[in-house]
Image: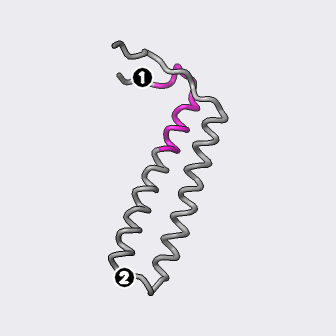
Amino acid sequence: MERPTSLAPMTRRDGVVLRVAAGWTVFVWATFIRNMLKDHTHSTGFKVVHITLAVVSLGFAAAIWMVAARNRKPAGDRVNTP
């Protein structure tokens, strides 16, 4: 099966939705991490697991933001990778 040589550009609305989702993820997990570090009722294991989940989610948020930003450029400026 042959891969398409170009993809349809992302709409502005789709880009905004992705950036809002990434921003919300950062806000929620940053707040959670701040609260978790102040909390003295949970075990260290609980904190490590949840902060690890937060770091992974923040990495996904960064990736989502970069996809939205990359797709705002005109189609001629993007490099298509197979």
Is tag 2's residue or tag 1's residue first in the polypeptide sequence? Answer: 2
Foreground of the two, 65 or 21: 21
Q: Quadrant of residue 57?
A: bottom left
User: Which residue: 36% across, 68% down?
Assistant: 49
Magenta span: predominant SS is helix
Rendered view: 28 above or below 18: below
Residue 80: which quarter of the image? top left
**What kind of residue is marked 2?**
Ser
Residue 63 to residue 78: above or below: below
Dot 2: element:
loop
Residue 9 lies within the magenta run: no
Q: Dot 2, crowdedness within 10 Å: few (<14), some or many (≥20)?
A: few
Q: Position of residue 24 (x, y in %)?
A: 59, 55
Viewport quadrant of the C terminus? top left
Q: Which mark is residue 3?
A: none
Amino acid type shown at disc 1: Asn
Q: Is residue 69 magenta?
A: yes
- Left or right of 40 on screen, residue 14: right
Label 1 crowd bin: few (<14), some (14–19), many (20+), radius 10 Å? few
Q: Position of residue 8 (x, y in %)?
A: 55, 21
User: In this picture, is 3 found above or below 78?
Assistant: above
* Residue 12 x, y percent position in the rendering: 65, 33
Report the residue at 43% width, 15% height from top: 5
Secondary structure of the residue carrying tag 1 is: loop
- Quarter of the image for the N terminus: give it: top left
Q: Which residues are magenta?
A: 64-78
Residue at image point 40% right, 56% down: 56
Name the mark nearer the viewer: 2 or 1. 2
Residue annotated with mark 2? 43
Give the percent coordinates (x, y) of residue 18. Answer: 58, 42
Task: Give the answer, above or below, for where 80 lies relative to 25.
Answer: above
Q: In the drawing, what numbered circle is on residue 80?
A: 1
